[in-house]
Image (spheres, rainbow, N blue to C red):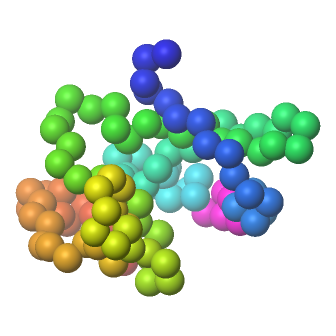
Amino acid sequence: HDGRYMVKTISQFEKTTLIKILPNYYEFLKKYHDSMVIKFCGFHEIDTKTFVVMVNVFDTDREIHDIYDLKGSKVGRSNRGRSGVKKDLDLQRKINLDPQIKQQFLDQIT
């Protein structure tokens, strides 16, 4: 195990959604190959379990200060001050990016 990939089980709804967005997702990653969006590299089913293989975004030489699980929702999206992974509503500070990275990010989300 070299830490380069992560395996995650997904629900039936997530499976259906991933299949639906896959063509647009693929085209997006072709256009923005350096995107910060998670990169899926496998989609598998064994018996009744469905799982995906993703590039591990935490496999980096950079120091990680905080981890956020951002989904773009406000419903149930806070860890209520507990330690660990933060969620959408916990992001209450300004994020400073290098100007070039900031522009790349803005290009991708607009």
Residue 99 vertical position relative to residue 84 in the rendered view, above or below:
below
Q: Is residue 31 left or right of residue 107?
A: right
Q: Is residue 85 left or right of residue 93?
A: right
User: What is the x, y in percent for residue 64?
Assistant: 21, 43
Segment colored magenta: 17-24
Q: How many numbered tags mark residues here? A: 0
Q: Nearer the viewer, residue 95 or 74?
A: 74
Q: Please tell me which residue is depicted at 9% across the width and 64% down the height of the picture.
A: 96
Does the rendering let one see residue 73?
no
Q: Please tell me which residue is depicted at 28% across the width and 69% down the height of the picture.
A: 81
Q: Please tell me which residue is depicted at 43% across the width and 24% down the height of the picture.
A: 3
Q: Is residue 86 left or right of residue 19?
A: left
User: What is the x, y in percent for residue 51?
Assistant: 71, 42
Q: Does the magenta-highlighted stretch encompass residue 21? A: yes
Per the picture, the main secondary structure of the magenta-coloured stretch is helix
Residue farthest top in this picture: 1
Q: Does the magenta-highlighted stretch encompass residue 52? A: no
Residue 2 vertical position relative to residue 17 in the rendered view, above or below:
above
User: What is the x, y in percent for residue 32?
Assistant: 40, 53
User: What is the x, y in percent for residue 102?
Assistant: 18, 64
Q: Please tell me which residue is depicted at 74% across the width and 57% down the height of the picture.
A: 11
Does the rendering let one see residue 69?
yes
Residue farthest right in this picture: 47
Q: Is residue 102 left or right of residue 80?
A: left
- Position of the C terminus, as image quadrant, is bottom left
